[in-house]
Amino acid sequence: MEALFSPSAVGREEDGLSACVLGAIAAAPIDARRDLYASIVLSGGTSLAPGLEARLLRDVDAATPSTVRVKVISNPARETLSWQGASLLSSLPEFASMWVTRAEYEQQGAACVHARCAASHPGS
């Protein structure tokens, strides 16, 4: 688990999990940051690593002013939350315009995905 927080320990130059969370919150509009610190959500199978939640909370809490409430939320079924979110998203009528059929993908490759998503989100 230490590699998630200190990638340099395994020869990687990327930021660790705590630094990524802090960086993402710092990049958000200032008026949203307090809410983001109070609702850090863990998701995915790796988030089930023993001690990950406590370590992330400790690191982020240590890097923020004492007046800021830091909360890490870890749903017991978090290993499937990404799938649940994707299922919900794909069931929305608005999402149908972004679907790419197998035939389209086989004919055009990844470019059709980028084109379809860009068309659905003008200005991206």
Image (spheres, helix red, strand yellow):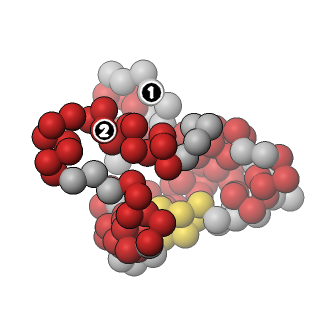
In the picture of the structure, the residue carrying the numbered disc 1 is 14
Please tell me the numbered disc located at residue 85: none
| Residue at image coords 32%, 67% | 83
Give how far apart the Cα atoms at labels 1 and 2 are.
Answer: 30 Å
Percent position of residue 8, x then y? 40, 25
Which residue is found at the position 30% from the left and 61% from the top?
45
Against 50, residue 16 (above or below) is: above
**Where residue 103 sits: x, y (%)?**
14, 48
Marks counted in the figure total: 2
Is residue 10 at least partly visible in the picture?
yes
Q: Check disc 1 and give the amino acid type.
A: Glu
Q: Is residue 81 visible?
A: no
State the residue in front, 124 or 32.
Answer: 124
Query: Could you tell me which residue is drawn at 33 percent across and 22 percent down?
Result: 11
Task: Name the outermost residue toward the bottom.
Answer: 76
71 w.r.t. 107: above or below: below
- Percent across and percent down for residue 33 are 76, 52
Vertical placement of residue 4 versus 44, above or below: above
Tell me the element at label 2. helix
Query: In this rendering, would 55 be left or right of 23?
Result: left
Could you classify mark 1 by the number of other residues whose Cα lies within 10 Å: few (under 14), some (14-19), or many (20 or more)? few
Q: Which mark's residue is nearer the viewer, 1 or 2?
A: 2
Which residue is label 2 attached to?
112
Element under label 1?
loop
